[in-house]
Amino acid sequence: LKILSHVANVIRIETNPGKYAMDSLRKAKIELENFFLDYLNLDGCIGRLFYDLALSCQYLHPQRGRSCVYQRNPWEPSEMGYMSVLEVPYLGTTAHTRHLLSKELRVLSRVRSVGCTMKFVDKRGRIPTNWVACKPYVWLWGHKPGDVDDAVKILNDANREHMNTCGCHLSR
C-alpha cells in the first residue's frame, strides 16, 4: 500500500504479479478501508468514500448493478451489500433534501418497500460530516443490486420532479 503524498487525492495499491496478486490487492484494500474507518471515526463522508473506492476497483468489485457496487457497509463493517450515492439538488449554496422526506411524496417509504436503507449526509445533522470537500449526498444500501437500482430510480424521479417545480439543480 502506497499513499503518495506529493500527488493530491492519489492512493496506489501495487502488488507483484503472480498467483497471490489478487489476494494481496484485496488485503491492501481492506487495510485501507480499515484505516479510513479508524481515521474518520464514522464521519458521514465514509459512505461516499467507500462507494468511490469500490467504484474505482472494478477487479475487486465486479458485482454491480446499473447504479450500485458491492461493498462493505461503512457503518456496519462486517456487513456486505450493494450501495449507491446520489447527489442532492441545490439552489445557490443550499442543499435540498426535504422533498425526499416529505410524507406526501412517500420517498422514504417507497425506498424501504424495495428493501433499501437511505441515509442523508450533510453538515446539519442526520449523518454529519465535518469534511468541507464532502458535499451533501444520499447514501443507499440494500442486499440485492436490483433493489438498490430501483431505489436510485425512486430518488432520481423525486429529485427531477422537485427540480422542475423548485428551480434548483444538481451541482456540477
Image: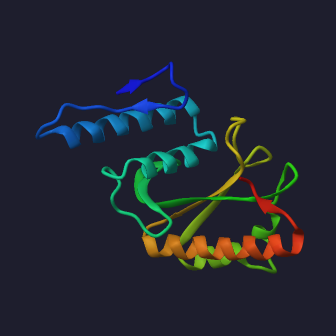
Q: Residue at x 71, y 46 (%)?
A: 135
Q: Is residue 94 above or below residue 154?
A: above
In the depicted view, which residue is nearer to us: 56 or 80?
A: 56
Q: Is residue 100 above or below residue 121?
A: below
Q: Residue at x 81, y 80 (%)?
A: 104
Q: Is residue 128 left or right of residue 28?
A: right
Q: Residue at x 23, y 36 (%)?
A: 24
Residue 107 lies, in percent from the top left, at: 70, 75
Which residue is at the far top?
6
Q: Is residue 83 left or right of residue 168?
A: left
Residue 144 lies, in percent from the top left, at: 42, 71
Q: Is residue 146 above or below residue 49?
A: below
Q: What number of labels is visible?
A: 0
Q: Residue at x 51, y 24 (%)?
A: 7
In the depicted view, which residue is nearer to us: 48 or 112?
A: 48
Q: Is residue 18 left or right of residue 118?
A: left
Q: Is residue 2 left or right of residue 67?
A: left
Residue 28 lies, in percent from the top left, at: 32, 34
> Residue 128 falls in which quadrant of the image?
top right
Residue 38 lies, in percent from the top left, at: 50, 31
Which residue is at the far left?
19
Display coloring: rainbow
Give the quarter of the figure containing the N terminus. Answer: top left
